[in-house]
Every structure is written in C-alpha cells, then in structure tokens.
Image (cartoon, rainbow, N blue to C red):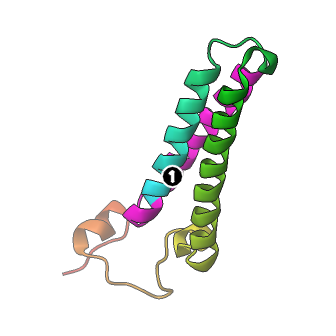
Amino acid sequence: MSQSLTQQLKTTCLTLLGSIQGLPSTIQDKGQQVSSSIEELQASFSSAGCFQDLSSSALAWSREMVTKAQESLEELLEYLTQNIPLDWIVGPFTPAGDSTLCPDEMVEEGKKVEA
C-alpha cells in the first residue's frame, strides 16, 4: 500500500511539474521541492511491504517529508490563487477585431491577400 501511494504521489507531482512550466522560477522550484520530497519518500518505502515494516524513525522522517511537500504545495496554491495566468482561464488571448495578421498568416488561414 505504501508503494502504491508514493507512486501515485510521484505521478501527480510529475503532472504538476509539467503544468507549472512558464511560471516564475521560484514557483517551479517549489514544485521541484515537492517532487524531490516525494521521490525520497518513495525510495524509503520501496523496501517495505506495508507501513508496519517501517521503523518509527523512518515514519517520523516520512512525516517530515510529507509536511515539507504540503507546505510547498500550499505556497504554490497561494501564488496561483493570487496570480492566475489568463490563458488558464480563457485560453490563448487575441483581442476581438484584431486584424494585424501578416500576409503569410492570412494565406495560411485561407484568406485572400490583396496587395
């Protein structure tokens, strides 16, 4: 069970890292910290068949890793709630009525270009 949980966490963290590309480096660093904590946790749990197989010190250490990961995720979430990238809400933004396409772009879009 512990291996399954840590594998799910790792997969989720990898998805998270891909999703925060383009955000400020401090935010990406937080995501990387979460991922590193989860990888360390997974490594420590890899030899255990269940939680009872882990020593009390290993469990205390894992609790610290999970707490650090949680704190980093909370900081990341706080940033996102205050600075939501517009393209996450409305997609690529193009002002209405913007017809500043160059002739090559007009041809690609199937529009007739008149000189």
Provide the residue designation for mark 1: 31
Magenta: main secondary structure? helix
Magenta segment boundaries in residue numbering: 1-27
Left or right, 103 with reference to 27:
left
Total marks placed: 1
Please say whether residue 85 is visible from this viewpoint: yes
As drawn, 13 above or below 73: above
In the rendered structure, does residue 14 fall within the stretch colored magenta? Answer: yes
x and y percentages locating residue 66 in the rendered image:
66, 43
Q: Quadrant of residue 84?
A: bottom right
Placement of 108 over or under 58, stated as above or below: below
Local crowd size for mark 1, using a 10 Å CA cut-off: few (<14), some (14–19), many (≥20): many
Residue at point 69%, 21% (across, down): 3
Question: Residue 56: horizontal and vertical position, in percent?
Answer: 73, 27
Rendering coords of residue 109 (x, y %): 38, 64
The foreground one among 97 and 60 is: 60
Where is residue 55 drawn, in percent x and y?
71, 21
| Rendered position, 114 above or below 41 | below
Q: Residue at x 62, y 71 (%)?
A: 78
Please state if 67 lies on the left or on the right of 100 as rendered: right
Q: Give the quadrant of the C terminus.
A: bottom left
Q: Amino acid at mark 1?
A: Gly
